[in-house]
Image (tube, helix red, strand yellow):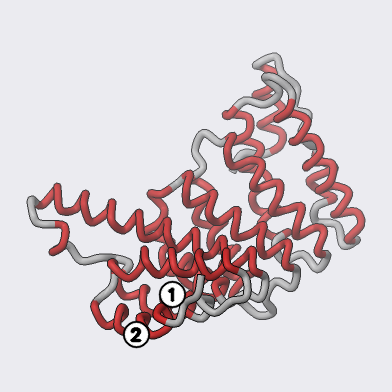
Amino acid sequence: PISFEQIIKRNIMAGTAPTLYTQRDLNCLADPDRNTRKRALEKIHNELTALINKRDGITSSQAQEYQTVLLAPLLKGFKDSAEKCRELSVLIMAKFLPLLTNPAAFAEPTIKAIKERLTGQPPEESEEVRLAMLQLLLASLTRTPSTVPECLHDVVSTVERSALDKFPDAKKVAADIAIFLAEQDIAACAAAAGASAAPSSLIPSPLQDHCPAMVRAFASNLSHQQQKIRLSALQAIGALVPRADGKVLSEALPAVAKLNL
């Protein structure tokens, strides 16, 4: 991994000074005191925001290097005992994502950390942090669709649990992720069909075995009191059913039939 000292040397040689954090900030991220950790995260978050808002404030290569150093402490921050530290860790990761030259380098460990936090024990308590993690998950998948195959199980597990989340906004993002997975599954099957000269309908769907559980989870949202949640659940089911076998459709139809938009 790139060290902080290597970043300093590289930026000095390039005529630029690193301003995102200091070695002391990195040390503070591992401090036993939660307030010390929070202050260090706030400083990094504020500095990153300022660099993003400043024209030519941070290059993609610099962002890649900074994120390489920060990845481990930020992912550890996902499990911090202090809610604010967890939130800031996720927000910093989200701010880095659009800047990176190679986001795929961080996608798999990020997705695994999100899955562990949202489906493990104890699960994330804060609605805002759960939502931020799901938004980061969707953004990571969107930027690095090539990571879907190796992370599919973790993503599906997260979607299933989040579809049942009590927070409506989390349900909505879970539906958006499910729709994205279905779209990627169609593209993957089409690409495989093109390579083998076989009809895409004959290409096994990697998502097929995961669809029944996800459809059942979203079907429970068809009677939700908020229209936007009922609609997002219906859209997710509509995207997933064609990727599954006929039994899934027959199981979903009774709930769909009762739907009142």
In the rendered image, is residue 35 in sight? yes
Q: Nearer the viewer, residue 146 or 165?
A: 165
The residue indicated by pointer 1 is 214
- Measuring 66% from the left and 76% from the top, which residue is drawn there? 166
Looking at the rendering, which quadrant does residue 256 occupy?
bottom left
Disc with the residue nearer the chain's start (2 vs 1): 1
In the depicted structure, whether residue 165 falls above or below residue 188? below
Label 2: few (<14), some (14–19) or many (≥20) C-alpha neighbours in 10 Å = some
C-alpha distance separating marks 2 and 1: 12 Å
The picture places residue 29, in percent across and down from the top left corner, at 80, 52
Q: Does residue 151 appear left or right of residue 99 in this picture?
A: left
The picture places residue 224, in percent across and down from the top left corner, at 58, 76
Q: Does residue 179 appear left or right of residue 85 in this picture?
A: left
Name the amino acid type tagged 1: Met
Question: Which mark, by number, is residue 251?
Answer: 2
Label 1 element class = helix
Mark 2 or 1, closer to the camera: 2
- Measuring 15% from the left and 53% from the top, which residue is drawn there? 193
Label 2 element class = helix
Q: Does residue 234 appear left or right of residue 185 in this picture?
A: right
- Measuring 50% from the left and 76% from the top, which residue is drawn there? 222
Marks 1 and 2: in contact by CB < 8 Å? Answer: no
Q: Nearer the viewer, residue 39 or 148?
A: 148
In the depicted structure, whether residue 84 falls above or below residue 7? below
Q: The N terminus is located in which quarter?
A: top right
Q: Does residue 244 appear left or right of residue 131 in this picture?
A: left
In the depicted structure, whether residue 6 falls above or below residue 83? above
- Measuring 44% from the left and 69% from the top, which residue is drawn there? 234
Residue at the far left: name it: 197
The picture places residue 233, in percent across and down from the top left corner, at 49, 69
Name the amino acid type tagged 2: Glu
Residue at the far top: name it: 15
